[in-house]
Image: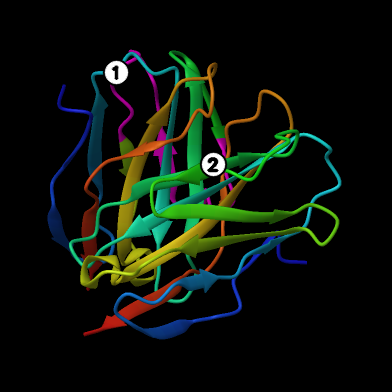
Amino acid sequence: NAGVTQTPKFQVLKTGQSMTLQCAQDMNHEYMSWYRQDPGMGLRLIHYSVGAGITDQGEVPNGYNVSRSTTEDFPLRLLSAAPSQTSVYFCASSRTSGYPGEQYFGPGTRLTVT
Amino acid sequence: AQKITQTQPGMFVQEKEAVTLDCTYDTSDPSYGLFWYKQPSSGEMIFLIYQGSYDQQNATEGRYSLNFQKARKSANLVISASQLGDSAMYFCAMREGFGNEKLTFGTGTRLTIIP
């Protein structure tokens, strides 16, 4: 199993550009989520999904869109990039049943907006 | 109020010593779970250990154990016999409520093991 994969690993954008961060998992997990990690702030939840066709906002959703058309994929779209969106982005997935239900994380995408 | 508080931004520990990383949490839900993740300098997030609010015993996983004090709302991670490879950021996280998968993370503790 590849687990959770993310592409690209690194990305530089200019202010105002849009892009999509890709996330895929091959573990048939129902739950998927996106976090951003900023220095001194830990990981903050952007958006999450409990299954195909179902998405919801997390703590910091502004400026980001998501969709979940399949169980495997959960892309994150930046609509109009801003320097405040410079961060490391992690995708994670987990089962919604079973113990302990830990989340599996992708390797991260380091995004710089200039 | 912060849901997860990690008060130690950085710690330095001698190799082979035990180390305790502090985590306090705030929730009014009787059903919750507490997770610890390790993030080495390579950046990936590695799950270490889990404690459920209804678990009767403190969780253990190899050299990792969780000192769970429910009344004090603390869930400290204890690493026994520290190794150089334990140098990393450590995050405490909480999942609140039955059927809720969302995690709230603390700000982390950077642990450095000194040879």
Is residue B41 visible to the viewer in this orientation of the structure?
yes
Q: What is the C-alpha distance between the residues marked 2 and 1?
A: 20 Å
Amino acid at dot 1? Met
Circle 2 packing at 10 Å, graded few (<14), some (14-19), many (20+), is many
Give how far across and how far down residue B72 sits, in percent. Answer: 82, 62
Task: Name the residue rendered at 24%, 41% in the picture.
Answer: A20
User: What are the residue bounds of the magenta stretch?
Assistant: A57-75
Task: Name the residue rendered at 71%, 38% in the picture.
Answer: B32
Residue A100 among magenta residues:
no
Amino acid at dot 2? Tyr
- The mark tally for this picture is 2
Quarter of the figure that contains the C terminus of chain A: bottom left
Residue A59 among magenta residues:
yes
Q: Quadrant of residue B88?
A: bottom left
Task: Name the residue rendered at 16%, 21% in the picture.
Answer: A1
Give how far across and how far down residue A73 sits, in percent. Answer: 29, 23
Disc 1 designates what residue? Answer: A27
Question: A54 above or below B3?
Answer: above
Q: In this view, does A22 lie to the left or right of B32?
A: left
Considering depth in this image, is B101 or B87 the residue closer to the camera? B87
Q: Quadrant of residue A58?
A: top right
Considering depth in this image, is A81 or B19 the residue closer to the camera? B19
Disc 2 designates what residue? Answer: B50
Q: Is residue A29 left or right of residue B105?
A: left
Q: What element carries label 2?
A: strand
